[in-house]
């Protein structure tokens, strides 16, 4: 999002830098950005900080409330500490990129933002999976106990028989070590099943 019509070459340079790896949509104002967000899923927003009527931090604060999963990046030629702090604390800005930006740096920042979005999505998916499984935790606990306990007991029983035969236990070993070791080996072997 950039509101500076006087710098179409900067926007075009940014587009060329990013479009080799990403689908890039550029808009010239915050209303057009909101319309794009409502129309299609967007993973990352790059927003100029200085815009007429609303700062980038103010806009991204709104975006955080309406589209919390979108990763937010601010581009700015100014390094005012108050703006940076507000951006991080209030708008949840992922990165603050200073102008003039270097193409490789901007590309790395956007790659990191996409990876952060993917991680957020995966964490959310795992949380949903846990919520589904949690009510059945008793059944899962019984199943896991049987899946490990039965091979352990069976292996230990076989080891008791083998321990009676010469040559199965070394001279320094104790019979209980042999029995427990064989039982645990059977339980661990059964884990993938």
Image: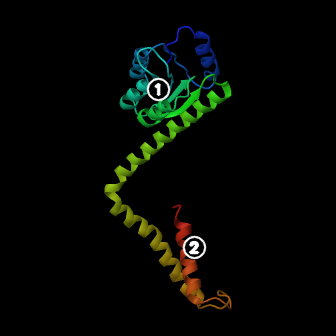
Vertical placement of residue 177 versus 3, above or below: below
Q: Residue 57 is drawn in which quadrant?
A: top left
149 or 121: nearer the viewer:
121
How many numbered circles are shown? Answer: 2
Crowd class of label 1 (few under 14; some 14 to 19; many from 20; radius 10 Å): some
- Give percent across and percent down for residue 77: 58, 22
Vertical placement of residue 71 versus 141, above or below: above
| Residue on which disc 2 sits | 185
| Residue on which disc 1 sits | 42
- Residue 117's label in the rendered image is none
Q: Residue 90 is drawn in which quadrant?
A: top left
Labels 1, 2: front one: 1
Considering the numbered disc 1 on the image, is that residue within a helix, a strand or a loop? loop
Q: Residue 124 is drawn in which quadrant?
A: top left
Q: Residue at x 47, y 43 (%)?
A: 122
Vertical placement of residue 81 versus 148, above or below: above
CA gap, disc 1 and disc 2 = 49 Å
- Give percent across and percent down for residue 187: 52, 71
- Give percent across and percent down for residue 141: 38, 65
Q: Residue at x 43, y 32 (%)?
A: 91
11 or 126: nearer the viewer:
11
Colouring of the image:
rainbow
- Give the farthest residue toward the left: 135
| Position of residue 141 in the picture relative to residue 7 (left or right) | left
- Give percent across and percent down for residue 191: 52, 64
């Amino acid at each position: 999002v950039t509101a500076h019509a006087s710098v179409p070459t900067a926007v075009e340079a940014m587009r060329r830098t990013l479009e080799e790896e990403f689908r890039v949509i550029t808009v010239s104002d915050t209303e057009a950005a909101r319309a794009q967000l409502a129309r299609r899923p967007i993973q990352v927003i790059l927003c100029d900080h200085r815009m007429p009527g609303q700062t980038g931090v103010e806009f991204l604060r709104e975006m955080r409330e309406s589209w919390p999963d979108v990763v937010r990046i601010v581009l700015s030629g100014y390094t005012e500490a108050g703006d940076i702090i507000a951006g991080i604390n209030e708008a949840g800005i992922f990165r603050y990129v200073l102008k003039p930006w270097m193409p490789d740096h901007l590309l790395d920042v956007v790659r990191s933002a996409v990876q952060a979005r993917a991680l957020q999505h995966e964490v959310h998916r795992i949380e949903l999976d846990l919520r589904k499984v949690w009510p059945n935790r008793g059944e899962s606990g019984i199943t896991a106990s049987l899946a490990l306990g039965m091979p352990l007991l069976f292996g230990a029983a076989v080891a008791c028989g083998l321990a009676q035969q010469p040559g199965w236990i070394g001279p320094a070993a104790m019979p209980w070590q042999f029995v427990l070791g064989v039982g645990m080996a059977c339980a661990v072997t059964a884990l993938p099943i």
